[in-house]
């Protein structure tokens, strides 16, 4: 029997679908004869008592989850997500540089430094990528710090705000599609496949309604993993291979019959009734990986 700790924060239980998914992990572990226990930040000192750690709280390198990951990793425990994956996926500039280095199909991206925020550079970006473009700060999650801009004045305004968060930004070609593919990958194999639909009148899966503080999300349409097109599978697995062998959610767009990577996420969303619609075994597969 393996003792698996699942690191969570209290907010993980605020969404009924996420809470149900966490219970599914616990039930899957018990069916497989493993011990599964939720671990909160006040319990971090208990990590040495476990054989593996599964992190479901947000894994920003500045959050407690990273401390948990690093601690478990240094103790030699099996851990999802490992600290290197968190570091790479948490910094989109680093990630896009790796995708470029290993020639992974990706959305055209230009890096912008603080001292390059001038007319000539902005003009050159628009000439190369067209209008509008998408600006991203390196440390993004749930569509935050990702904005579209179509003129120099708005480009400057968004960039100045984002530069308060980072010295380098990513500027990407705007690539409108009806949905983004989300391919869940575990240990270099497809775990699940979804289409994250773009809400009507919006351009990304999660978007704010005008005048509202909260996000609206598009539908999640799942497919059986064996039906994933071979080229989509190839690109998704190649993208993950440059990060590691853990659990990832790759966002891709289908453009002119081919697939390009938008980004790779560690700690991908797994909500009951969403990502698990077609492949109910994803819970058991993750538990089996952790207890192997």
Image (cartoon, rainbow, N blue to C red):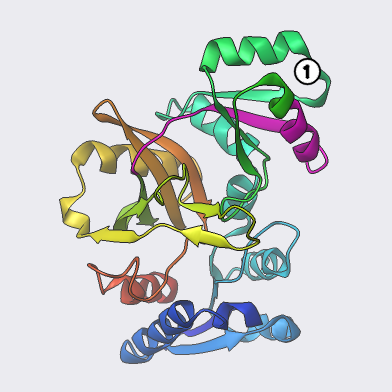
Q: Nearer the viewer, residue 284 or 212?
A: 212
Residue that protrudes farthest toward the left in the picture: 227
Q: Residues within 10 Å of mark 1 (few under 14, many from 20)?
A: few
Which residues lie in the magenta part?
Answer: 156-178
Find numbered disc 1 in the image and state the secondary structure of the residue it sits on. Answer: helix
Q: Is residue 159 magenta?
A: yes
Quarter of the picture holding the C terminus: bottom left
Residue that protrudes farthest toward the front in the picture: 211
Left or right, 93 with reference to 222: right
| x, y percent for residue 194 | 31, 56
Residue in the image at 46% along x and 81% along y: 22
| x, y percent for residue 174 | 49, 29
Left or right, 11 with reference to 249: right
| x, y percent for residue 105 | 39, 28
Residue 9: tell me if it is visible. no
| Depicted 187 relative to depicted 76: above or below | above
Q: Quadrant of residue 83?
A: bottom right
Left or right, 287 with reference to 224: right
Q: Which residue is mark 1?
A: 116
Residue in the image at 73% along x and 64% along y: 63
Residue in the image at 38% along x and 71% along y: 286
Left or right, 138 with reference to 254: right
Q: Quadrant of residue 128?
A: top right
């Amino acid at each position: 029997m393996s003792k698996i700790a699942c690191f969570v924060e209290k907010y993980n239980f605020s969404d009924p679908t996420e809470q149900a998914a966490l219970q599914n992990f616990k039930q899957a572990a018990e069916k497989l004869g493993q011990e599964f226990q939720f671990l909160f930040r006040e319990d971090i000192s208990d990590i040495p008592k476990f054989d593996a750690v599964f992190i479901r709280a947000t894994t920003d390198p500045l959050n407690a989850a990273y401390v948990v990951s690093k601690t478990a990793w240094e103790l030699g425990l099996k851990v999802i997500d490992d600290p290197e994956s968190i570091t790479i996926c948490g910094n989109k500039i680093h990630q896009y540089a790796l995708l470029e280095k290993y020639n992974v199909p990706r959305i055209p991206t230009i890096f912008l430094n603080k001292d390059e925020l001038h007319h000539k550079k902005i003009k050159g970006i628009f000439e190369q990528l067209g209008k509008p473009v998408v600006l991203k700060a390196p440390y993004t999650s749930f569509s935050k710090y990702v904005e579209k801009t179509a003129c120099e004045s708005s480009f400057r305004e968004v960039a100045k705000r984002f530069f308060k968060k980072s010295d380098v930004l990513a500027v990407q070609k705007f690539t409108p599609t009806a949905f983004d593919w989300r391919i869940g990958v575990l240990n270099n194999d497809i775990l699940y496949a979804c289409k994250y639909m773009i809400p009507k009148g919006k351009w990304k899966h999660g978007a704010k309604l005008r005048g509202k503080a909260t996000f609206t999300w598009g539908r999640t349409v799942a497919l059986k993993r064996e039906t994933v097109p071979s080229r989509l599978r190839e690109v998704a697995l190649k993208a993950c291979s440059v990060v590691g062998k853990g659990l990832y959610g790759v966002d891709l767009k289908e453009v002119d019959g081919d697939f390009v990577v938008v980004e790779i996420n560690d700690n991908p969303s797994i909500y009951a009734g969403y990502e698990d619609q077609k492949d109910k075994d994803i819970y058991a597969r993750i538990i089996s990986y952790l207890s192997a």
